[in-house]
Image (cartoon, rainbow, N blue to C red):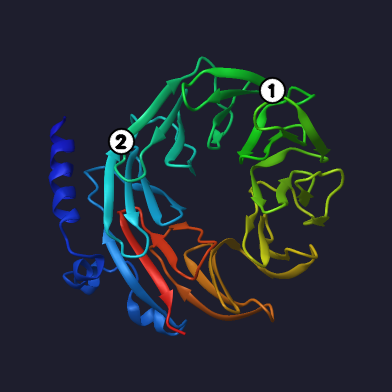
Amino acid sequence: MTAIERGRTLLLAAIVTCTGALPCLSRQTKTDELIWPRLLERANLEIRWQHDLPLVKSESLNRLFLIEDRLYALTSQNYLFSLNRNSGGMVFGTSLAAPGLVVPGFRLYDDGLIAAIGNELVEIDPNTGQRMLSRGVDFGLSCLPAGNTSFFYIPGADGRIRVIRRSDVVKLFEVAAPSRSSITSVIASDDLVVFSTTAGEVVAIAPDSPKRLWQFNAGGRIIGPLVRDGRMILAASEDTYVYNLDAKPATRPIWKHQTAAILNKAPRVTRQYVYQYVNTKGLTAIDKVAGTLVWQVPDGLDILAEAPGKAYVFKEKGELVVMDSLAGKKLYSVNVTPASLYAANLTDSKIYLADKKGRVVCLRPTR
């Protein structure tokens, strides 16, 4: 263990012994707060908690991920912090990978957090941060692996998905799209596995065999990740459309929504809406059932959270916009700079923001 790691370990131990995130915040001065509380009052928001992560010299916070009840923060040195998203309390901190290696993201399957690190499939214990599995592969990974209770699905840059049994890490079979194009996304459950390609294919296979169940062809590259919501599979394509496909089977779309721009981000799906970032146009809210345009926020980057009748949108240059989601009108806006990082919350009304210095804040509506 290096001197830097020893110092961080001691600081983490001190943080974990803190009785809660709110007492920790109360010991800070106003100059330490990421967002001045008085600014939030106009938008009927308040700070639920703030946590200052123990970054080392020359390290910065790069990304936030929200997965179920945990908020994960990844630094420029590939150090991973896990926080309880409700209280802000530290769950663990661990050195995930060597600095410089690309970590595209994480997925929680069964009792493990799956990540692709370089040419390794890694499974992490979400309670301790310890590695439960590390399997090197002799091919490049094209996107984030997927998994269900029985198998891992590892997408290679050569256009093939290797299917690995979880119990003994034995490869069972491989599968590829008819075009042999590179895989852009793979999602898995115990009843269905679906993957997409740069050629615009969306292919569903049986979870335990290479049997193809159905295939849909879009007019351009599918932007990963695919999103499954019950029987719906949402896909954004470079052909300018957002597609809503029926998982059983997708012979034709339930609906398709044209955005009039080449898409470069995947959609976000909530109970009522599909949110799609559209280059040069902003964030678009699409009715999930009808596939029709509801409203648009120019320069909007992403959805932060929803509350009854409201949607919270993160805009360029650190602006938080509160939308009346039924009327499609802007209610308020708040300058939340220097917050430049966020995690999209698709399940409740809590808002998660952070800055490069490692200050992470949770906001919540007051009414």
Residue pointed to by mark 2: 130
Is residue 355 placed above or below 107 in the rendered structure? Answer: below
Q: Position of residue 220 (x, y in %)?
A: 78, 39
Residue 24's mark?
Answer: none
Q: Amino acid at mark 1?
A: Val
Which element type, helix, strand or loop, lies under badge 1?
strand
On the image, which quarter does residue 184 sit in?
top right
Question: Can residue 228 be spotted in the picture?
Answer: yes
Q: Nearer the viewer, residue 283 or 95?
A: 95
Kindly indicate the quadrant of the structure image that contains residue 26: bottom left
Residue in the image at 83% along x and 40% along y: 219
Query: For this view, does 30 lie left or right of residue 280?
Result: left
Q: Residue at x 54, y 21 (%)?
A: 140
Q: Residue 234 vs residue 134: left or right?
A: right
Say above or below: 57 vs 21.
above
Report helix, strand or loop for mark 2: loop
* Residue 282 drawn at (x, y percent): 65, 61
Percent x, y for residue 145?
A: 54, 33
Specify the farthest residue to the top: 138
- Mark 1 or mark 2, earlier in chain: 2
The residue at 48%/21% (across/down) is 169
User: How many residues crowd around disc 1 within 10 Å: few (fewer than 14), some, or many (20 or more)?
Assistant: some
**Left or right: 167 in relation to 153:** left
Q: Which residue is mark 1?
A: 175
Q: Position of residue 269 (x, y in %)?
A: 63, 58
**Frontmost residue, 169 versus 359:** 169
Instruction: Please state which amino acid type lies under the numbered disc 2.
Output: Gln
Q: Which residue is at 29% across, 42% downward?
A: 128
Q: Is 213 on the left-hand or right-hand side of 303?
A: right
